[in-house]
Amino acid sequence: MSVNERTTDTFHLSTTDLHSAVTAYLAGLGCSADAATAVASVVTMAEIDGAKSHGVFRLPGYAASLRSGKVNKNSQPAVTLSTGGLLAVDGDRGFAPAALEQFRNRFCEVTNAQGIAALALKNVFHFSALWADVEWLCRQGLVAMAFTNYVPYVAPAGGTKPIYGTNPMAFGWPRPSGDPMIFDQASSVMARGDLSLAARAGHDVALGTGIDKAGNPTTSPQEILEGAMLTFGGYKGSNIALMVELLAGPLIGENLSFESELEDNADGGPPRGGQFLLAVSPSRLSPDAGTRAERLFEYLGRQAGTRLPASRRYANREIAQRDGVWIERSAANLLGFN
Amino acid sequence: MSVNERTTDTFHLSTTDLHSAVTAYLAGLGCSADAATAVASVVTMAEIDGAKSHGVFRLPGYAASLRSGKVNKNSQPAVTLSTGGLLAVDGDRGFAPAALEQFRNRFCEVTNAQGIAALALKNVFHFSALWADVEWLCRQGLVAMAFTNYVPYVAPAGGTKPIYGTNPMAFGWPRPSGDPMIFDQASSVMARGDLSLAARAGHDVALGTGIDKAGNPTTSPQEILEGAMLTFGGYKGSNIALMVELLAGPLIGENLSFESELEDNADGGPPRGGQFLLAVSPSRLSPDAGTRAERLFEYLGRQAGTRLPASRRYANREIAQRDGVWIERSAANLLGFN
């Protein structure tokens, strides 16, 4: 569904109304004002950008984890380590965006001071896309990377049982004029949210997306949800999944995906876990980094059929900011619209 | 060809004899002793580990770039920036391993002091695998990543003309007891060296490896060498290639792959370019990083059909250290054996 798809099952509202409604919805469930606003921002951005699987589709999960008491409604994130280029934050069992919004300015300062820095975010519930975190850092002039792991949905290359999360990684490059170049991609062929959406809609998915419980290839999203998802590009994508698993788990003293699942209360919300971010100041390393990169973007643009990873998202965003968004009616009802 | 393959076309020698012979060969071409030893170490490691496409197969390229005068035989690498977590080294137009061997201890010290650091290596000729650089850092207890770009061989997703190099990235994780977990993989489906080896041997490659000059799928390695290689995993691998291109080029003030090609004298050796390395001290971030990671490796090992990325290389190495290696007779002749 695109941001401007209008059917009888969709409901239209402005981007600011959407943000207010999501904030109020989460606050109504007891979430602190700061956390509600931070989560509403990433949910709204996902809807505006057409990344539907991270938009209002996830509200029931956010709500479930607040209702069950798994997520700390009044989390007080705090810095637990700050030395050299390392910054570690304990999210106090709150939503990841709340902790990040509180400490991203400081992370930016550390990066500018040291030229390179890492942010280890522990003890949070991560249910949003990495995109928003990376975009913010890019808009401060930094090159940024982000990694997170999740409950085990994805089989390693050669195997048949889930071990890895969908383990997304995001990379962003700031552009002197205009929007940053960003990609945010799961290590699996398909994002979990998109697989769930396909199952709900009754659509088949491409062969290679996953396997059933017995380890056989299947195009049924439901069978894959019960079996295992596969990594993109075979063993090379499996290596990427392994890297993300290590960076967002052991490196920062956090759970592996399978440990997060064991610990989780299965309320339908996200499991507790961690997130790892890296940032580098390109201007500290190379005064002409920006102009050199523009030569690449320009050269890429000359070749028909190619596009920069972020271009579709920014195009959706422009439309939504002008025309508003159409969200699923079930989500609109949840938000109090009739 | 495995490390212990014995045919009439192979020649047997010990690993130390191979290292000495490669060192002497490069020194005989005027290469300084330090550079000859450093390059011989990475060539020998590739042979020992069964990574044939980065072994003696590349000696003619090394030789050509020394003979043409493109590579500085007596390079004097120097630090051009050292601030916070950033270390930049100008390789003075020498081989990359020479500059790295000279400054890797210092890079390790910066990483331990800051917790995280980046090494920008500029103005070098990179013709070896990233593996060796990452393994050395891992053996100092660091988590390490390395990236390099190259001449344009690889088409971006959706396109048909080469823009990216094969753009490898390597990631390594130190293990408390035993060999580090490492992967070193091209962003292309196949490594360029392996494609060249297939063309030389007259073997077809899998569909999806590349396209011919007209942009059509082909299984002929020769047609792909003349056309374009493709990235692994479609647009996701293309995004990885783009990231590597930006990190090893613009970020450190170095050439893009297509700029390296324009500048190159086409002597058959590697083009001038850069390499970007990242290192993090896991013990600074999390005292139990090592034990947490071992839980993942153990859990992975329980699943039939899976293996850690580095296991085949270490198995080859063990055999070679015991039994010596068998190299192609043509390479042995080059090294003065009959």
Image (tube, coloured by chain):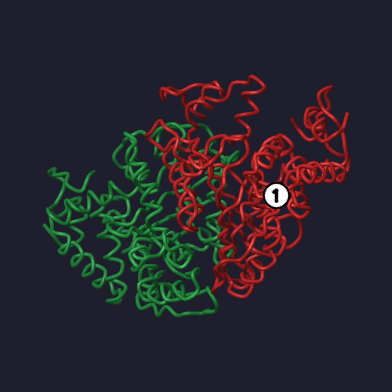
Chain colours: A green, B red
Horizontal side, residue B50 vs residue A60: left or right = right
* Circle 1 chain: B
Q: Quadrant of residue B213?
A: top left
How far across and how far down the image is residue B54, in percent? 68, 39
Q: Which residue is mark 1?
A: B73
The answer to whether residue B264 is above or below residue B249 is above
Q: Quadrant of residue A144?
A: bottom left
Which residue corresponds to the image point at 59% horizontal and 21% vertical from the top-left? B204
Give the side of residue A29 with respect to residue B34, left or right. left
Q: Which residue is painted at 32% across and 41% down in the image?
A: A301
Q: Foreground: B330 or A159?
A: B330
Asked if one can make out residue B5 in the rendered structure from this viewpoint, the answer is yes
Q: Secondary structure at mark 1?
A: loop
Which is more toward the observer, B179 or B331?
B331
Q: Quadrant of residue B146?
A: bottom right
Please determine whether, in this image, residue B106 is positioned above or below residue A175: below
Q: Amino acid at mark 1?
A: Lys
Along the horizontal axis of the image, is B161 left or right of B146?
left
